[in-house]
Image: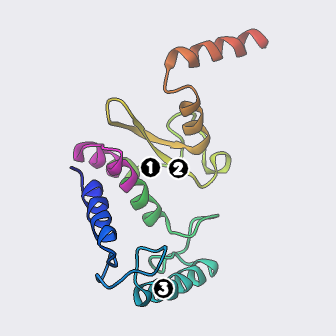
């Protein structure tokens, strides 16, 4: 059982008992928190969003990435967490960390820069083999998703474009 599954299971058990997921007091109807924890969370989120609106990361005091609410470091932490949740082994996560440290701002799929991929860099991975492939732009990541990572489809698409020229 992964860490994520363990945490979800613990939350489900507490919710079945009608306990707050943080302090075990009785729940507010329709929530997973008690009233004091819910009030604290609302106050915390209000401060975070005010910080983000001022151009500062919601988790630290670094400048945010254009069009985002977090700095580059915290955006990458979130993306690494998603890879871990997808089941990638630690060795592959280490490859992703090294790749991010050496990242030069160019998509490893098309060679584009941030100006034509936007602020959204993706940690691309193989969903079947559970391996990290590289850092690519959002548009390239979407394209690979549309063709379901099938090189044969990409070759047929390239041939189609050649015929049209």
Q: Is residue 151 left or right of residue 27?
A: right
Identify the residue shown where x is 31% and y is 79%.
Answer: 22
Indicate whether 75 appears above or below 115. below
Q: Disc 2 to disc 3, how far (Cα)?
A: 28 Å
Q: Are marks 2 and 1 in contact (CB under 8 Å)?
A: yes
Residue topped by disc 1 = 103
- Residues packed near mark 3 inside 10 Å, few (<14), some (14 to 19) or many (20 plus): few
- Of tags 3 and 1, which is closer to the observer? 3
In whole angstroms, how far apart are the C-alphas of marks 3 and 1?
33 Å
Q: Element type at marker 3?
A: helix
What's the mark number on residue 121?
2
Are the residues at dot 3 and dot 1 in contact (C-beta closer than 8 Å)? Answer: no
Looking at this rendering, what residue extends furthest in the top direction? 163
Name the quadrant containing residue 10: bottom left
- Around disc 1, counting alpha carbons within 10 Å, would you say few (fewer than 14), some (14 to 19), or many (20 or more)? few
Residue that numbered label 3 is attached to: 44
Instruction: Estimate how packed mark 2 is, as few (under 14), some (14 to 19) or many (20 or more) residues with alpha carbons within 10 Å.
Output: many
**90 in the magenta segment:** yes
Residue 69, horizontal then vertical, whole percent: 57, 70
Answer above or below: position of 127 versus 104: above
Range shown magenta: 81-97
Give the number of the disc on residue 151: none
Residue 156's x, y, as percent?
61, 12
Residue positioned 64% across, 79% down in the render: 53
């Amino acid at each position: 059982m992964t860490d994520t599954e363990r945490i979800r299971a613990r939350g489900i058990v507490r919710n079945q008992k009608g306990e707050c997921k943080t302090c075990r007091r009785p729940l507010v109807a329709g929530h997973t928190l008690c009233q004091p924890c819910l009030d604290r969370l609302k106050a915390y989120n209000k401060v975070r969003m005010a910080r983000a609106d001022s151009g500062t990361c919601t988790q630290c005091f670094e400048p945010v990435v254009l069009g985002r609410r977090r700095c580059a470091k915290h955006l990458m932490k979130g993306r690494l967490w998603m890879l871990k949740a997808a089941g990638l082994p630690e060795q592959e996560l280490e490859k992703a960390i090294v790749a991010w440290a050496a990242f030069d701002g160019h998509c490893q799929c098309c060679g584009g820069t941030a100006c034509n991929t936007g602020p959204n860099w993706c940690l691309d991975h193989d969903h079947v083999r559970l391996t990290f492939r590289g850092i690519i732009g959002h548009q390239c990541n979407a394209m690979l998703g549309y063709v379901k990572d099938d090189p044969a489809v990409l070759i047929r698409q390239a041939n189609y474009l050649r015929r049209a020229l």
